[in-house]
């Protein structure tokens, strides 16, 4: 905050009188990658782990040169190409990604949060409370809610955010409405959420974008989270 105030003061001394400068803090929109890589072991002496390492380096290099900046754009086709080119033995890959934002609730107190994913979010209507690939387009990391452990947030396909708990493949709706999601703009509102525990530094919300090209605008910076899930 002090640095922001100092920056505004510095700029104001040099700006025309009719302009009141305002420094806006950037927000980060993280990219989480999952990739299944197929390679030909007959044309290489490299092990699975070595192929994995080469793919991780290729993804990191691609992200460094493509995003991590204002007005960044990431194209799925180019990411796929970077993975295929990670090693000459790689035949193809099946790669997907989610966009991630984090909220930091205060334990034992209700809190409301607005998250801007800055991209349209995929919309799916669940059949008998189940989604095609097993998870909703919008999900979160687990937390404890109303004494129930391993709860998580998800969208219901109709613009409502729910708190649910899954056990042995059966999904129980713990809270039917805890916020809203605008699939077109990517804005998520979480309202009056009170949790009693969570792991790590916060609760991560992950969203499947509706397009294979994602971007960032205004003060939002796309950033690679550097924790890909890769299998060969």
Image: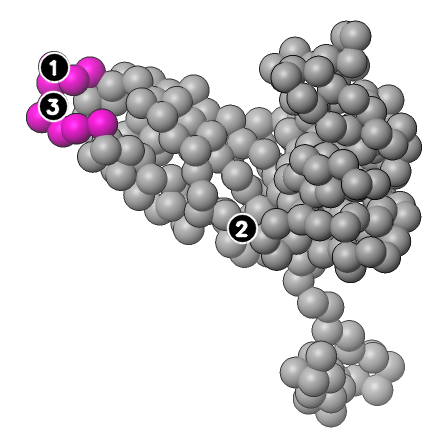
Q: Are marks 2 and 1 in contact (CB under 8 Å)?
A: no
| Residue in the image at 74% along x and 19% along y | 171
- Per the image, is 92 magenta? no
- Taking the spot 65% from the left edge, 83% from the top edge, the residue there is 3
Q: Position of residue 5 (x, y in %)?
A: 73, 84
Give coordinates of residue 148: x percent, y percent.
76, 36
- The residue pinned by badge 2 equals 223
Measure the alpha-carbon separation of dots 3 and 2: 33 Å
Mark 2 → mark 1, Cα distance in angstroms: 36 Å
Q: Taking 216 as reference, is 230 above or below it?
A: above
Q: CA distance from mark 3 to mark 1?
A: 6 Å
Q: Please report whichever mark, 3 or 2, sits nearer to the chain's N-terminal start.
A: 3
Per the rendered image, the range of residues in magenta is 40-48
Q: Which residue occupies the foreground of this view, 71 or 108?
A: 108
Q: Please state, as top left, top right, bottom left or bottom right, where the N terminus lies in the image.
A: bottom right
The tally of labels here is 3
Say whether marks 3 and 1 touch (CB < 8 Å): yes
Residue 70, picture quadrant: bottom right
> At 50% from the left edge and 48% from the top edge, which residue is drawn?
225
In the displayed orientation, state which residue is furthest to the left.
45
Q: Position of residue 78 (x, y in %)?
A: 43, 31
């Amino acid at each position: 905050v002090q640095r922001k105030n100092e920056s505004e003061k510095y700029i104001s001394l040099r700006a025309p009188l009719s302009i009141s400068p305002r420094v806006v803090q950037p927000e980060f929109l993280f990219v989480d990658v999952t990739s299944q890589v197929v390679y030909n072991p007959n044309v290489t002496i490299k092990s699975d782990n070595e192929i994995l390492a080469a793919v991780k380096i290729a993804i990191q290099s691609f992200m460094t040169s493509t995003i991590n900046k204002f007005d960044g754009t990431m194209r799925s086709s180019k990411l796929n190409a970077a993975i295929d080119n990670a090693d000459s033995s790689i035949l193809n890959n099946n790669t997907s990604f989610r966009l991630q934002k984090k909220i930091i609730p205060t334990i034992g107190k209700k809190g409301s949060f607005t998250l801007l994913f800055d991209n349209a979010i995929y919309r799916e209507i669940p059949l008998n409370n189940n989604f095609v690939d097993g998870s909703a387009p919008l999900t979160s990391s687990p937390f404890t809610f109303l004494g129930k452990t391993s709860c998580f947030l998800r969208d219901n396909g109709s613009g409502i955010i729910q708190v649910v708990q899954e056990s042995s493949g059966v999904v129980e709706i713990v809270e039917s409405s805890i916020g809203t999601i605008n699939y077109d703009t990517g804005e998520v509102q979480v309202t009056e959420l009170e949790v009693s525990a969570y792991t790590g530094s916060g609760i991560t919300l992950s969203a499947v974008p509706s397009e294979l090209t994602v971007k960032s605008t205004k003060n939002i910076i796309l950033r690679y989270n550097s924790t890909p899930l890769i299998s060969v």
